[in-house]
Amino acid sequence: MQGIELSRGFYTEIVRPWLSQVAPELRYSAALIGYGSELIGFDDETSKDHNWGPRVHIYVSQDSFRNDARWLVAEFSKSAPASYLGEPIGWRSRPHPPANGVEAAGSPGHGLEFHTLEARLEEHFALRSTASLNARQWLGFAEQKLLAFTSGAVFRDDDDRLGQARHRLEYFPDDVWLYKIACQWRRIAEEQAFVGRAGQVGDDLGSRVIAARLVRDVMRMGFLLERRYAPYSKWLGSSFAELPIAKTLSPHLRRAMLSNMWMERGDALACAYLELANKQNSIGVADFESIVGAYHDRPFTTINADAAVAAAHSAITDAWIKGLPIVGSLDQVSDLTPLLEDARLSQKMMSQLGQ
């Protein structure tokens, strides 16, 4: 059984009836969001060694949290079963400890946690409301964290506050999205000729490393063009394979990765760039005339990526975003996990953009 369904059953059969008895007036949301491979359906036997198992997050108002959360956590410890469907409900400690904070309460003895939505947003995104997000904040959100908050499952949502927050974060606003597309093409433009140049001087390893970087850039562009958040690196390939565009891109990317000849590597990547251009043009926003050919007078196959950058950038209507340097959002300028996972640090770094 996948973790989401295990937790859904745990809530439906154990937690919900218990809450109905001990706190019948409590209004709350119940969900499993925030972290874990099970949120995007990629959990397996290996996932069971950390934070996997029957667990559910209960979101209540700040008043209800102050009045009820900690005694409910303690009471559940007294009546909860030791296991559910053969899985122990006790906490598996790596990498996250049980919830414990000003507006978070949990126990090592079971997977029932209480939170306020405000505290979860603050921990996850360094904000306490999603009501009026600005472009600078959006550019400081890591896609993997947006995915973790908007995937998973909501089992109950009495006041729809959790649902509204998830809806507002469902995907980037159009101008932020176009800016990210322009910046992703800029990444490709900067390195696409180097696959051939490194190979030309006999640096096969260097050529392969650059090709691998470009393969990842193509994959992440695929997520952008499909309007899907990209996960953290462990599941990038698995999640990419589920995108509609992967059917046409994957053969070219495999050829680029497996080829022993730098010219074939470059040609395969150029075919992938052309598929991205075709997809972008099919959307009807930021279309451009794509041209694949030699890089100036050098024998390296590339695409006119500068035209793709210009097309996406010209489609932006927000003046502040349009005035930004074409360098990228948070996870386009860094893939450092401690930065991507630390929301305050992420926002602090990206706050310098455009100043």
Image (spheres, rainbow, N blue to C red):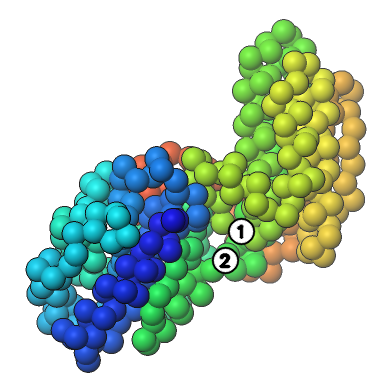
Vertical side of 190 occupied by 15: above or below: below
2 or 1: tag closer to the N-terminus: 2
Q: Secondary structure at mark 2?
A: loop
Question: Which one is nearer the viewer's eye here, 132 or 212?
Answer: 212
* Residue 59: percent from left, percent from top: 29, 75
Residue 8 location, quadrant: bottom left
* Residue 226: percent from left, percent from top: 69, 58
Residue 10 lies left or right of residue 238; in this view the side is: left
Circle number at residue 171:
2
Circle number at residue 139:
none
- Which numbered disc, 2 or 1, marks the residue closer to the eye? 1
**Residue to which mark 1 is pinned:** 228
Residue contact between numbered discs 2 and 1, judged by CB atoms under 8 Å: yes
* Residue 107: percent from left, percent from top: 15, 60
Residue most toward the front? Answer: 86
Is any atom of residue 142 visible in this view?
Answer: no
Q: Secondary structure at mark 1?
A: loop
Residue 205 lies left or right of residue 33; in this view the side is: right
Vertical side of 21 occupied by 319: above or below: above
- Amino acid type, residue under disc 1 in the picture: Arg
* Residue 22: percent from left, percent from top: 16, 84
Is any atom of residue 175 visible in this view?
Answer: yes
| Residue at figure coordinates x 82%, y 65% from the top left | 284
Residue most toward the top? Answer: 202
Question: Which one is nearer the viewer's eye here, 308 or 38?
Answer: 38
Vertical side of 39 occupied by 171: above or below: below
